Image: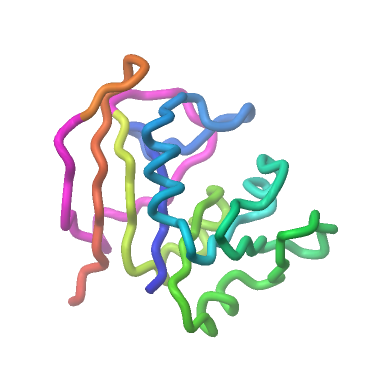
Amino acid sequence: MIRAIVALDNKNGLSDEHGIPWDLPTDRAYFRQKTDGHTVLMGEGTYREFKKPWQNRRNVVATHGAHLRPGFEMTNDARAFLKQANEDIWAIGGAGLFETTIDMIDELYVTQLDGDFHCTKFFPEYKEAFELAQQSEPKTENGITYTYQVWSRKTS
């Protein structure tokens, strides 16, 4: 199963030039819990945000020739990597990776934030190809209200 996990504002915003413009420790814990023990696939920009690989995960970076720090693996073709995968994969960003692989994703785990955070990087449109399967009750942390959602790819 190929899944994506992402937090989005009301305009499908992911981040800006400084990174993620919100601070939600509970959502970070949710991310860690969902991806624990699995393979995570990230683009080069997302890789640069991490000082070290996520523990207890296989950390794969879709990049063309970047020298990676120990604990990270390279694939130069994210789509080919996903096609040949025989394990659960979590796509974790960024915008370029999501844009090029959205058609291969089976489930989306979306933390839907209430508000516009003036992002400059965006998640691709997905609501025509996916249907909302689950949604949590709203939560508020650091003045931000959000829900956890699971979207499944439509079958027809």
Left or right: 76 as drawn, with respect to 59? right
Inspect the magenta stretch and tell me whether residue 5 lies in it.
no
Left or right: 92 as drawn, with respect to 73? left
Q: Residue at x 23, y 28 (%)?
A: 139
Most extreme residue toward the front, as rendered?
56
Q: Is residue 37 above or below residue 123?
A: below
Q: Is residue 34 above or below residue 1?
A: above
Q: Residue at x 46, y 24 (%)?
A: 23
Q: Quadrant of residue 102?
A: bottom left
Left or right: 113 as drawn, with respect to 40? left
- Residue 144: image x %, image y %? 32, 21
Q: Residue at x 30, y 37 (%)?
A: 112
Range drawn in magenta: 114-138
Q: Give the overall secondary structure of the magenta segment.
A: loop
Q: Quadrant of residue 80?
A: bottom right
Q: How many marks?
A: 0
Q: Residue at x 36, y 17 (%)?
A: 142
Q: Quadrant of residue 145?
A: top left
- Residue 116: image x %, image y %? 37, 24
- Residue 59: image x %, image y %? 62, 61
Q: Which quarter of the figure is the N terminus placed in? A: bottom left
- Residue 7: image x %, image y %? 40, 40
